Image (tube, rainbow, N blue to C red):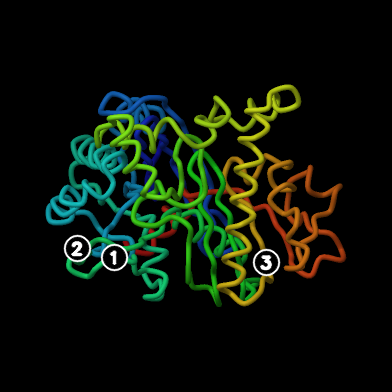
Amino acid sequence: MDLAGVILCLNCGSSSVKAACLEPAPGRAGAQRRLRAIDVEGAGPDAIARALDGVAPPGAAPAAVAHRIVHGGRFYTRATRVDAQVTARLRELVPLAPLHLPAALAGLDEAARRWPGCPQVACFDTAFHADLPEVARRLPLPAQVLGDEVRRYGFHGLSYAHVLWTLGDAVPPRIVIAHLGSGASLVAVADGRAVDTTMGFTPAGGVPMGTRTGDLDPGVLFYLARARGLTLEALERLCEHQSGLLGVGGSADVRELAARAPHDSAAKLALALFAYHVRKAIGGLAAVLGGLDLLVFTGGIGEHAAQVRADACQGLEPLGVQLDPARNPAGDGVISGAASRCLVRVIPADEESQMAREASALL
């Protein structure tokens, strides 16, 4: 396989590794064509090696390797060419994203070992939110404990940037984008710029997710530590891996919950709770924007779970949101009704294409 001109995109997660090879596609500037892609279960060097083997045969070097980096801290606000200094700084940022950054660093190491001299580009999920207004960025804690690093960052930025690229010239002034998947967040975009988002200091905040609590009264954690004797590690495991849809409904898979919901009250509650918090977030972000011109659903749940979309939009009629009962189940393109003052769309997530665009522009 000839990889000349190809950007290899690598997304190393805490439980899976995704790799894809993309090249420029004819037509619109920045369009990408996916040549080969693979999703490998597992984490660590072995899973990364299997993912790279699956998209790039040994000996074939791509034009560049683009890495999805979940957290860039306050240092990285755009795609960045990776060198020893960048790698060292990312290692310093591991405490900000202990579940994600070690895996990404392992991907950097493996790509550098496999293709010495091949350009590597770090593409940051936090970069999209780098210019959040101070009122949205500031956490309500004393300045002396905040330091320079404790603030609201926001995540899923690569997905949000791809949505805006897809919209092209059709970007209205007031947009809410809902990236709903095993990790879920929403963002308010005013005139093409992020002004608020649901995730904060870490990807654990915001709406409830597959296994994460989302926003939680800190008093709950204080109480559990005292009354249940939970350690810091146990609390972290509880909030990151045992809560959300899994904790309420017994599964993190919306498809399984939907199949059980008609006869299982826990599954029904989990889905209702998820849609309820998404609906609250849409309303809150619309208030920040002063109204709503466009609502976009993306991510695995956002793209494929029509009932979740319907439940999340129920009650948003005062914002002009009205789904078309025939279009919504199809889940493709525009799903709002003719009378809806707010356009509602489904746009497939494609973080790899955004990574390839950012890497190509940088190099």
Q: Which residue is mark 2?
A: 145
Mark 2 vs 3: CB contact within 8 A: no
- Residue at 36%, 25% in the rendered image: 42
Answer with mark 3 or mark 1, whichever residue precedes in sequence: 1
What element does badge 1 sit on? loop
Badge 2 local density, few (<14 within 10 Å), some, or many (20+)?
Answer: few
Amino acid at pointer 1: Leu
Of all residues shown, which one is farthest toward the front? Answer: 227
Amino acid at pointer 3: Leu
What element does badge 2 sit on? helix
Residue placed most toward the observer, 23 or 212: 212
Quarter where residue 273 is shown: top right
- Residue at 61%, 60% in the rendered image: 282
In the image: residue 236, left or right of residue 83 = right
Q: Which residue is mark 1?
A: 141
In the image: residue 229, left or right of residue 20 = left
What element does badge 3 sit on? strand
Mark 1 vs 2: CB contact within 8 A: yes
Answer with mark 2 or mark 3, whichever residue precedes in sequence: 2
Residue placed most toward the observer, 255 or 208: 208
